[in-house]
Amino acid sequence: MMRSPVKPLVILMTTLSASVQAADLTDVANAAWSYDGTWRAERQNWEADQETLVQGRAALLPTIDASYGRYRTNQRIEDGGVDLDYDREASSVNLTQPLFRLDAFYGYKEAKATVSVSQANFYQARQDFVLRVAQGYFGVLRAWDNLVSAQAEEKAISRQLDQTSERFDVGLVPRTDVEEAQAAYDLTRVSLIVAEQDFAIARDQLETLTGQRWDNLAELREELPMSGPAPENMDAWLDKAAYQNPQILASRFTAKAAGCTADRQFGAMMPQVQLVGSYTHLHTAPDDDTGGATGFGSGITPDNHGTEIGIEVTMPLFRGGALNSQRKQAVLRADAADQTYLQTVRDVTQQARSAFRTVQADSLRVQARNQAIRSASSALEATQSGYEVGTRNVVDVLNAQQALYAAQRDYANARYDYILNSLTLQSAAGDLDVQNLVSVNEWLSSEQTLDLYNPDLEGQSEEKIVTPR
């Protein structure tokens, strides 16, 4: 967590290769890097928060002030009946160097802790950026796979409706079979409309994230190494989360800053010792027409120079009880920050534990969903054959068809869930970086691409339809 929060990003952005055909995950990340307003704001906020350290250190360093004034003076001396008119210029330079100031010392430590909080928040923002990019990219692919399955289901049930109507026309099936098939078809039409809408929304969200239109995206390869978390030991993930999770670090440094605030408020009640020095120059220019009774003979000298250096000690004695009240308030807030930190550790640990188990289950779920497709396909063929010979009715066929396409959608969703939940696990462990997008990018196919505005919906949905033997 002590690495530079910006340098790894710059290196990645210069090493990502641009795709010459379909855009991939790294191309989308590059575009979002320079366009995403949330991410750009976080980078600017991090840069701005670095100035907090400079401001906190300033109270320990010398301060130098200079002043200059020009004045017109009219003075009457009553005893002598003399009127004096003259111009006066005053300039001074003052230097102050703190020698002993507990409040300034703890204020500097408070500033360091505050900058550490900012850095931890920046790491969290970087992880959130990576997740947004992955969610945006795979959200489009997920919506497309669901749309293909919905289209395939609509086609299959439409054909079943036509077949049932033909059988009804020749008296082989009752009217209720046609009505059952029509009801199932109407429901698939609704699902298809929703899937089309979801795909368009996901495509728009990706463009909003990146600020540009994407014509083609690389799709996932069919065979992927979805074997579960690595390492397989949950304790390793929990230990890593406790050590480098940005939320835990931010909470830890927030508690440290609150403790420094309490110390600073105590220091404000202590004596303050500082070295002071000054140089002054006064120049007076009397009017020439005042005569001998005025001017320099009246005790006004044209130039005065003065230097002063010494040690100054100050201590607040009583300010209406405000200082002690502020100290007590800061102590209570520091105790509250400690409790918040402990609770954050518990919450993040639970999040990491849940994410680990989710990825474990996702790995098994992908395998099970893939097997479910084969089983549902075999069940559909058997049910269709039974329907042909009269041992099954049309409701059985429709249910079998819906089960098959539900299995196809579940399998596609399980694959995307595994990818995104794996990134979430790495985020909980504080180990998610833009380099992870490069690793996930290797799971994309250079041959299988998706045309976002002219997709081959008819062709791909036809491939998913199971034709009974």
Image (cartoon, rainbow, N blue to C red):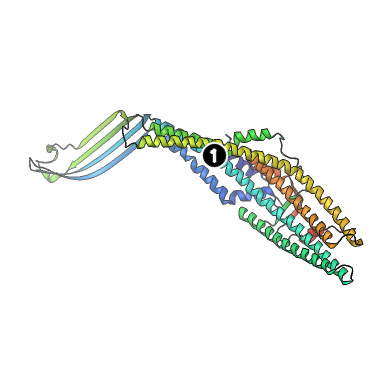
Callout 1: 10 Å neighbours few (<14), some, many (20+)? many
On the question of residue 4 being in view, the answer is: no
Where residue 347 appears, as percent x and y from the top left, is: 59, 39
Where residue 196 appears, as percent x and y from the top left, is: 70, 61
Left or right side of 351 for 101: left
The residue furthest left is: 80
Determine the residue positioned at 86% across, 53% down.
Answer: 378
Q: In this view of the protein, which residue sits in the foreground, 413 or 404?
A: 404
Q: Which amino acid, mark 1?
A: Gln
Q: Is residue 402 above or below residue 2?
A: below
Left or right side of 72 for 343: right
Choose top left, top right, bottom left or bottom right for residue 120.
top right
Residue behind mark 1: 119
Determine the residue positioned at 47% across, 35% down.
Answer: 334
On the question of residue 118 being in view, the answer is: yes
Determine the residue positioned at 78% across, 48% down.
Answer: 369
